[in-house]
Amino acid sequence: LLFKKQMCCKTPKEIMEQELPVGFRFYPTEVELILFYLRIQLGGGDATIHSLIPVLDVFSVEPTQLPNLAGERCRGDGEQWLFFVPRQEREARGGRPSRTTGSGYWKATGSPGPVFSPDNRVIGVKKTMVFYTGKAPTGRKTKWKMNEYKAVDETACV
């Protein structure tokens, strides 16, 4: 817990320059993703943070390509990779984003759920998606899963 408190006070550059001891890995919590990393990105970003969490339209690549496109601290991790995904223009205007790739599509499963801060404020929304090969609605479900996090709004992160 002390390590996380110290990490939140550092700049992205200081975090990247910090060597992690053997056995440690970059595995931020949902709250850290929203209140620290996503807040920096929404505030204009910091070039250093993109080596941790790169900007990538994950819907323009196949899921099998994602591990090689991950940031420095996630590359080689067999469990998770993190990306900032730019909003599509149609989504920004209130429409549904296109979640299709060359070989299939990402489909939302279940209902989006709230992400709470330690003091019980809703700071974001989490949506889970699964990748299907082929075309909807007859696609075949795969093992690929993605969690999408959205900040409720920028002021909720302050």
Image (cartoon, rainbow, N blue to C red):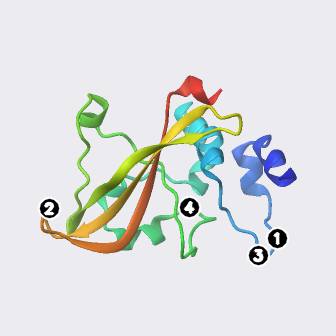
Helix, strand or loop at label 2? It is loop
Distance, label 1 to label 3, CA atoms, is 6 Å
SS under mark 1: loop
Looking at marks 3 and 4 on the same chain, the residue that comes earlier in the sequence is marked by 3
Q: Which mark is residue 21?
A: 1
**Residue 143 image point, x, y percent:** 37, 75
Q: Residue 95 location, x and y as percent?
A: 23, 34
First reached walking from the N terminus: tag 1 or tag 4: 1
Q: Nearer the viewer, mark 1 or mark 2?
A: 2
Q: Quarter-wise, where is residue 10 in the image? A: top right
| Residue assigned mark 3 | 23
Q: Looking at the image, which residue sits at the far top? A: 155
Label located before the other in sequence (2 or 4): 4
- The residue under the point 53% across, 67% down is 80
- Give the SS element for disc 3: loop
Q: Residues within 10 Å of mark 3 (few under 14, many from 20)?
A: few
Residue found 26% across the figure and 28% down from its top: 93
